[in-house]
Every structure is written in C-alpha cells, then in structure tokens.
Amino acid sequence: MSARLFTSRRLTSSTRPGTPGRRHLPTVALSVVALVALAGCSSAESAPSGTGSAANGSAADSVSVDDPWVKAADSGMSAAFGEITNSGSEDVTVVSVTTPASTALELHETVENESGSMVMREKDGGFTVPAGGDLVLAPGGNHIMLMDLVEPVVAGDEVTFTLTFSDESTLDFTAPAKDYAGANESYEGDDMEGMEGMEGMDHGDADHGDMDHDDSGAATTTPGATDAPDAGDE
Amino acid sequence: MSRDQAHEPGRGGPTRRQLLFGGAVAGIGAVAAIGTDTLVRRDGRGSETSEPDMALNGGLSVPFYGTHQAGIETPPQAHVTLVALDLRPEVDRDGLRRLLRILTDDAARLTQGAPALADSEPELAQVPARLTVTFGFGPELVRRGMPDGSSAGALPTWLRPLPAFGVDRLEDAWNDGDLLLQIGADDAFTVAHAQRMLLKDARSLTTVRWTQSGFRRAHGSEKSGTTMRNLFGQVDGTVNPAPTTPDFDDLVWIGDGWLAGGTSMVVRRISMDLDAWDRLDRSGREQSTGRFLSTGAPLTGTREHDEPDFEATTAIGFPVIPEFSHVRRARSDDTSERIFRRGYNYDDAPTGDQVSSSGLLFVSFQADVDTQFVPLQRRLDELDLLNEWTTPIGSAVFAIPPGCSEGGFVGETLLGDGS
C-alpha cells in the first residue's frame, strides 16, 4: 500500500518542464517509471529533487508529498491537493509552487472572515509544515491554486508540480487529475452537489466564474453566491 | 418470495445468532453489531448475543496486484455489480491509458480498505469485505488501444458478440460494452461505494451502458465453498474446474500475447420464468436438469459431485438421466470444451402482472470463447429442457487482461508504451 501508482515521492525528474497533459504522454510515462522506481524507497533514501535542490539537510530532503491530485478543469482555475509530510526536526515552509500546467499559482488557506464566513485567501508567508508533522491540502481547506491553466487538465493527466521551500530547495511531485465535482469556486444555483464543495470557499479577489467545467456546459455563476456562502462545511 | 428459505433441520443449519451476525454485521462493523445485539435482546432471545470479540468479516481483503486479476479465482463474494461502459467518441489510446491508470489506482486502494484518491466519502472505504474489481475490455476498446501501425493481431478472434442462438431474446440494453467493471464484495454497501468512485473517475471518458447486480448467500450464511443455488432452487455450478489447479489454469488462463495471464469473460443475462417453473412438479424439475434438487447429486448418484452415469437406464429402459436434461446436454466428450462459471442470481422488481423478474447473471471465464463456450452453448441451444424456463436476454464478451504489479496498471500490456 505504500507505493501506489499515484503516491508521489521525490522524483528524479526526467520530465521536461512544460510537458504536462495528454499531448505528451510518452514523456509523462517516463516520469511514472521514475516514480515507480522511487516509490518503494523510504523518504530518507529518496533521491534529491532533480531541479536545483540543495544538498542534504535541505527542507526538500525531509518532505514528501503523498496522495497528490489535481482537479480536472477545461480552463481557468483549478486546485491541487495532497498531504505534505515533514519528517525532519525543523519546521519547513513552502514559499512557492510552480507547474507547467498553469501560468500562475497561489498557496491558499481557508479562514473565517470578520462576518463569520469561511473565505479563501492567499496564505501570507506560504505553507509551514511543522517538524514531524504534516499539512493536509484538501477541498474546503488549504490548497494549491492554479490560477490560469495553460491547457485543459483532463482526468488521468499527470501534472508535475515543483515546491520551493524557504531555503530555496525544491521538491517535484506528480499529481494525477481527478474528475471532482467539489472544490468549486462558484457553483450552479441548482446543483447541490456542487454547492457542498464550494461552501465557504469565497475568493474575494477574483472572478472565478470561468472555473466551472461541468460537462453539461450549463454552468452558470450565481451572482452574489460567493458573497454569502454557507458556513459549516466540515 | 423469500430468498432465504428455512434450513432443513439436522443439516447443521446456522443458528439464529449466526444468521443475524453473518448477514448484518459483516458490513458495517461496530455500529451494526450494536444494532443487532439490541434487536435480538428485544425479542427475548438475547442470552447468547453478547459477544464483543465476535470476528467481523468486513476487514477481510483480497490482494489487488498479481499475475492474474482478482475476482476470477477469488471465491465468489456475496454481491456483485457488473458495469459495462461505452467509451466516449474522442477517447483514444492515450485516453485509455489515463483511464486505466486512474481506475487501477482507485481499485488498488479501495480493495485494501483505503479511500480512493479524492474520495469524498472516505469513511465508506474502510470496510473492504473482500472487495475485488476486475476489468474487462470489449472489442472497441482493444481496437482503440492497439499501438499505431500494429496489425489487428491484438484483437482475439473470439472478442466479438457470440453467434446468435435460437433461444436468445436479446435486448440491446443488456448487450456488449467497451469496458467492463466487475465489482464484487461480501457487502453490498462496499460494492456501492466502489462503483460510485470508479464511475466518477470514468465519467469524463465513458458513459454507462448497463449495470447488472447479483447476489449469492450472504457471507457466513453457509459453509464457504458450498455450490450456489439459483432461484429455481437448483444447485448451480457443480461441475466447475477448481481454481489454482493445473486443470483450471489450462482451461482459463491465456498463455501468450498481451492477454497472457488473462482470460475471456462471457456475461449472459438469463431470465428465469419462475412463474412457469412453479407449475412443474419436483420430479419434472429434477428430470429437466438431471440432478436431485435436494443435494444436487446426479439422478444416478447420491452426492453432489458423483459422476453422472449417462448409461444407466430405468426398469423400462429409459435413461435415468434424460437425453434432454441440462446435465446431459452440457457434457461434451471433448474435455477441452469446459468453462469456469462464476455467476450470480438477480431478482429485480417485478413490473405489471409479474410477481417476479428474476434470473441468472451467468458469468464464465475461459481461455477461448470460440472453442470452449460456443460449442457448449450450441449443444444447449439445440436441446436442453431447461430452455423452456430460461431465456437469455443479454450477452456480452470481454477480454480480461492480466493483473499488474504495484506501480503498473491493468491493461498496460495493451496500452503501455512498450507494446
């Protein structure tokens, strides 16, 4: 169980930057081979990240990303989730993240605002993962926001991300795309399933209407909905 | 009608407590245990119900990875749902690879009692109850999955609709399909959650063509290994090669090509006219199959697995096992014309004037449909008294690819880059 297909550990990346998505599957498949080869290793034995990682003792060396996934979306925004585990004795901080799949990314947190609503906002100073602890990125909570997809991310795509830590070490991981109805930034007024995922997820600073990717094509942004989200999403 | 007929006394039938616990507790763990306990106490028979260390079956799991896919040699679970998916038009070889990777990952996790990735109801994944997920490929999937420029050699000649049989009354709603999921577990709740997760991951690439659910006795109701009965009351599946024996391996597993370690699967939805069957007396029922209803023994024997004696005659010279009986017609002199059956019962809601809409979800595995299943079915089609009460209304054939190891995916021998 420890080495599932999509349990990403540190990759020795043979993936060229800028090659996510279905048009480049041969390359992606290579990265899967690397993933498989490494997945059986404990994190202590893992190879360092292939792109500019610092020497042993860096933040990246003590961190693994487990069960990562990214929400499939046709265009606009998406989000990535997973569990970041810090096996080291020092807190580490993720200060930025990049992916070929999106021109811009943000680290987001979900917090209660002055009026008691849960809202999402960019996390000042990045994600801190405590020593010996973990940080769960999940719909309705902390997540990596893909602000502007380069091309559609479809179910089963494998998207490579690079985390950069405060000591400038980096860690690559590959996340499969999942067709997921929740984690919406906006919702259809008559779609209760969609509502569950968006409850409390209010981006006050952008128009997220283009994130909807419902196959029906009937997605509509309900005006005002994001201004009055239901609290209480567990 | 009740599917749980009273057990004959003196046959070691389960106690009330075993029935309750075997049926209800396997799935939902401690909560169900409390509920059952309370239930029994309330009706005044609670003295023997307090058993905190009672073994639960929900935690049992079947390994996912291996040479062969699970769900074939696996002793049949109590519940199954078969889902046939059609590929959306745009899905190509790359799309198939994405689809099978993600479904494999889901199945690998769920069968071990872990939530699927992005499982929105992770608590429902915690009771695997011997969950298995078996993938099968229809001809269209294999065609789209073949590497560019390859000949059609990847498509087995038998991977096509079965030849038309005279007894068939096929309804398109139950036929064919591009990708089959066989989801089996001892707990229907587990099946439902696994089905939901798998279909969520497949929906952008596929549409549901049909689903068929079936059941056997609940886990723990009977000694494991007991041959299934169908809703006619017949012991159904006595002559079956035993998994992991050389005989089974020869009959079931394919030896070479991308299907090495795989097999073929025939799914037939066979409607059983229970209402007409009701008009047949017990002797007539036994004549139609050539077996005793009580034990499943051939009419020339006393125990279920006794070899039928087709030469034996009655005092007035008729064969004891009639020429038209199912047992006689199913038997070939050619021992290679055998299959491995792993079917289920179905019992749908009746409509209109019906009081039942029931039948058999016939499932067989064999290395070659054309040389093993088809000749057998031809003989039954030509003559089998059971045809009076049974009607095939759905039919599908799938190639079952081999299993995979950790990090791989089911279908990689067709869809992988090296092929």
Image (tube, helix red, strand yellow):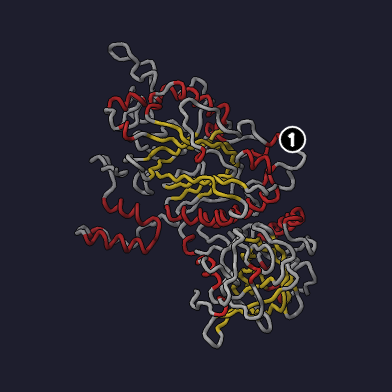
Q: Which residue is mark 1?
A: B151
The answer to whether residue B285 is above or below residue B115 is above
- Count residues near mark 1 (Cα–Cα under 10 Å), then give few for <14, some for 14-19, many for 20+: few
B9 and A137: which is toward the camera: A137
Q: Residue B157's quadrant in the figure?
A: top right
Regarding mark 1 in the picture, which secondary structure is present there? loop
B160 and B371: which is toward the camera: B160
Point out residue B212 in the picture as x, y percentages from the top left corner. 47, 44
Point out residue B47 in the picture as x, y percentages from the top left corner. 22, 60
The answer to whether residue A178 is above or below residue B226 is below
Q: Can I make out residue A70 in this image?
A: yes
Quarter of the image containing the C terminus of chain B?
A: top right
Left or right for B297, reference B66: left
Q: Residue at x 67, y 67 (%)?
A: A43
Q: Residue B359's quadrant in the figure?
A: top left
The answer to whether residue B382 is above or below residue A6 is above
Label 1: chain letter:
B
Q: Residue furthest left?
A: B44
